[in-house]
Structure formats: C-alpha cells, structure tokens
Image: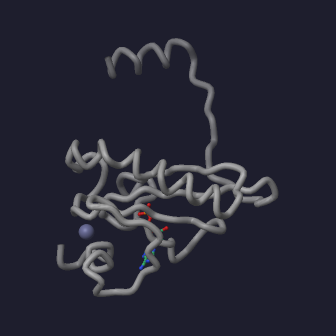
Amino acid sequence: MDNCIFCKILKNEIPSSTVYEDDKFRAIMDIGPIAKGHVILLAKEHAANLLEADDELLAAALPAVKKVAKAVKKTLGCDGINVLQNNGEEAGQTVFHFHLHLIPRYADDNQEILWNPTSPSAEELAQIRELLS
Ligand code: AMP
Ligand code: ZN
C-alpha cells in the first residue's frame, strides 16, 4: 500500500523505534503515547483492520501481544495493560493498517480510556441478542 504510513515504517522508509519483531508482526513505540511505554503492534501484512485481516495472522496476534505485554510489564513495572484495537473511523481508527495498542497502566497515571456504560432494558438487550444470534 503506497500511501500507508505503517507499510512505510515496515519497509524502513520512515523511522520508528522497534521493540519487538517476528515474522508476522513488529512492535514499535507509539509516536503519541497516552502512557509511558505505549506500544503498537503492527501486522507486517497490510490489511485495513481486523475485519479484513487474514485468520492465520489473527491467530498469531494474541501470542505476540502476550509476549510484548509481558516484556513491557517486566521492564516498566506497570500495574496493568490495556490492549486496544480500533476498527473504522467511528471507532477511533486513524491509521488503516491492522494494529493493536498495548497501553501500560500505572496506579497513579490519571489516564482515562473513554467508556460510558448505558442502561438498556432487558427487552432492548433481548432484541439485539435476537438480531445477533
Ligand atoms: P489508531 O487510532 O488505532 O489507528 O492508532 C494509530 C496510532 O498510530 C496512534 O496512536 C498514533 O499515535 C500512532 N502513529 C501514527 N503515526 C506513527 C508513527 N509514524 N510512528 C509511531 N506511531 C504512529
Ligand atoms: Zn499498510
């Protein structure tokens, strides 16, 4: 993909800070970290997002996330880690090349990941379940 910034990073056409690499993924430091040690795991194969990614690639994604998460936790001593993955502009995706965020969390980080629970009725939940099942 000629215009994809992550493809360019993966071809070393633009600089990045690599923290992990295997045959399917490369983890780099996020250029706009929301926490100390915010890393993004980039698929080496271009797919716009999870819905378009190859199943074999997806099967390898969580073991790679686990490896990087463990290294981040051990090295930085964070108290927790959010793993986030955005699909589509409305979901907050800004770079349309499949990647996952690993966001270390610290007891005193004052960081908020937006999450506003709603209170649908039992009927509404049942209707949606009906549509989805
Ligand atoms: P998303 O909003 O889920 O698509 O995430 C894209 C992420 O890529 C953002 O957190 C950006 O800060 C990050 N990003 C964009 N360009 C670069 C870059 N050149 N190097 C490292 N991270 C980048
Ligand atoms: Zn790409």
Q: Is residue 126 left or right of residue 77?
A: left
**Percent position (x, y) of residue 47?**
23, 58
Q: Nearer the viewer, residue 16 or 73?
A: 73
Q: Is residue 37 above or below residue 65?
A: below
**Percent position (x, y) of residue 87?**
37, 52
Q: Nearer the viewer, residue 116 or 1?
A: 1
Q: Is residue 106 above or below residue 117?
A: below
> In which quadrant will I find the C terminus?
top left
**Percent position (x, y) of residue 13?**
28, 87
Q: Is residue 75 left or right of residue 106?
A: left
> In which quadrant will I find the N terminus?
bottom left
Q: Nearer the viewer, residue 63 or 117?
A: 63
Q: Is residue 80 above or below residue 34?
A: above
Q: Nearer the viewer, residue 84 or 87?
A: 84
At 40% from the left edge and 17% from the top edge, which residue is drawn? Answer: 129
Give ligand 1's quarter of the image: bottom left
